[in-house]
Image (cartoon, grey):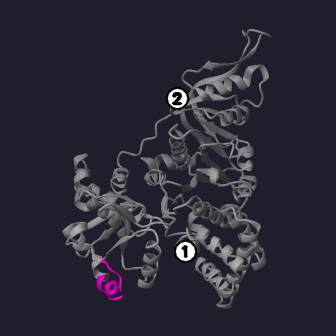
Amino acid sequence: MIDLLRFICRKNNYEKVKLGKITKRLCLDFIYSGDGKGWKWKRQFFSDFSIDMRVSINPHITIVGKSGSGKSNACKLIMKALNLSGITTIVFDAHNEYVRIANDISADVYDATYTGINIFALDGMSVKERTSELADTFKRIFRLGEVQSYTLYKCIRYAYKIAMFEGREPRLGDLFFAINVFKKHAQRTEMGTLESIEKRLVVLNGASFSSNIEFDRIIGKSCIFALSGLHTNEAQKLYIEGFLKRFYTKMLQLEKRDSVKFYIVIDEAEKLEDGSMIGRIIAEGRKYGVGVMTISQRAKVLESSVRGNASVNIIFYQREPDELNYLANLVAGGNELNRFTEVKKAIRNLSQGNAVVVCGTRNPEVVKFDLYEIAKEYLGDYISKFAVPGISKADLFGKMRSLGFCDDDIANGLERLIVDNVVKAHSFEHESGSEWYITMPRNSAEHDIMLGRISRKLSSDGIRNSIYNSSYGPDIVAFYDGEKVAIEYETGMKKVEDTLAMLSSRSRYYKQIAVIVNDKHFDRYSKAGVECLKASDFFRNGFAKA
């Protein structure tokens, strides 16, 4: 049925997107104390709210409001309706929130932890130009000083020299190698600068910033980039910037169009400050059929070109004074005949799911957005929720059966999620028939599933603990025998030397460190001098006995 609707919409070039009901409209009221007229909100009945992309000055959309006010719901409604209209979307999903609707918008899902952009690709630029641009990008995103920025520039230039000698483009690993080369020959002052740069950049994942994506495939189909596996705002910013840079180059090669062909959707768009590549795409994208939709909690901190070029502004509840005044001015365009006061009052009094909307030159309207509902036939939403912390096959099927789903449907839904890269699977060799699933792990599926299992085992043994799973801390911190204990899980994929170096670093802050190792790799780690426990022994005997 959905495919039929999509075909009809495309055949009729339908671009009018219905999203909810208009409940109020700001109008001039000629019965007004004072000079006889003024702006007042008038109730509306039986009025559908829609966005017609064919008559917009430009296709760009901005959605702002407090957390929980209804921004994500409105964004999902728009994306689903755009999909029915034959318009594709490229979504940057900060918290993997939109992954669950991938099936509804016919989107492929890419986990940013494993799939990324080679930020060092030249894209027709000279090495000097690209090096300078990269240094400026790093400086802006990581807030580097002038000395740090120039030192990083020299490291990037050296990374290019190494790679070009081998006849290839650099990767992130080449940059870290270059930093280490400079450290070996650095004076004390420069050593401090290099160490501070290295510490800032350590949050970057090599696979996320060294891979190449097929842009022809992406532009022709909706896709969602799940960013939660990138642990910091800086890593997410750099990932988005790298993608937008490559996209901009590709966009300029497209044929010019009169109508929008696809949208770039950016969640938490406040990450992109002034100077971002998004400004160029917004300024020039309309000619190539490219629209940009940004979602943010605060409009005031958005990149200036985003604020100035959106023809559709959707504003949900806000009460922070500076932001409220800014939004009221943005919508009202002045305080003629009390217009600003009325708009400000409306924004402050909005209930959940309601927004003040301005479309082009139309007067502001209060819109009650429809509630987004995932297609009932798509049970992947339930599966992905249950699999967030990691869940065994037996427990997952048990939970799904309790909701009334049959085994065949569960298996088909699970298979679809695995193919779409939303859910990852892992089987433990030391446990017969033990198959587990996890939604968008930060690291490998085995690693993050095991952290959840270890944490739950510790809690069942009465040991308080917290999962950290970050670049700067241990996998788990447990409170045992009056002390904090660092607990690490090793899948066996890491070099033993790297594990020993990590343990040495941990020993500065933790008196006790417990290492739990995949049974298959236990002998290799223990022979190298790592004091460790087999995973099977840990789950059989518990923390204290093991």
Secondary structure found at label 2:
loop
Asked whether residue 524 is drawn in magenta, I would say yes
> Can I make out residue 297 in this image?
yes
How far is disc 2 from disc 1 in space, using C-alphas? 44 Å
Asked whether residue 411 is drawn in magenta, I would say no
Q: Residue 528: where, in percent of width, then height?
A: 36, 88
Q: Is residue 93 left or right of residue 449?
A: right
Secondary structure found at label 1:
helix
Q: Residue at x 48, y 64 (%)?
A: 111
Name the residue carrying label 1: 206
- Give neighbour class at mark 1: few <14, some 14-19, many 20+ (Cα, 10 Å): some
Residue nearer the viewer, 352 or 2: 352
Bounds of the magenta segment: 522-532
Q: Residue at x 19, y 72 (%)?
A: 432
Q: Is residue 39 above or below residue 364?
A: above
Q: Residue 128: where, in percent of width, then height?
A: 78, 78
Q: Earlier in the sequence, mark 2 or mark 1?
A: 1
Q: Is residue 210 above or below residue 268?
A: below
Name the residue carrying label 2: 351
Q: Is residue 277 left or right of residue 498?
A: right
Amino acid type indicated by mark 2: Ser
Amino acid type indicated by mark 1: Gly
* Image label count: 2
- For this orientation, the residue located farthest to the bottom is 165
Q: Residue at x 75, y 70 (%)?
A: 147
Q: Residue 305: where, in percent of width, then height?
A: 74, 49
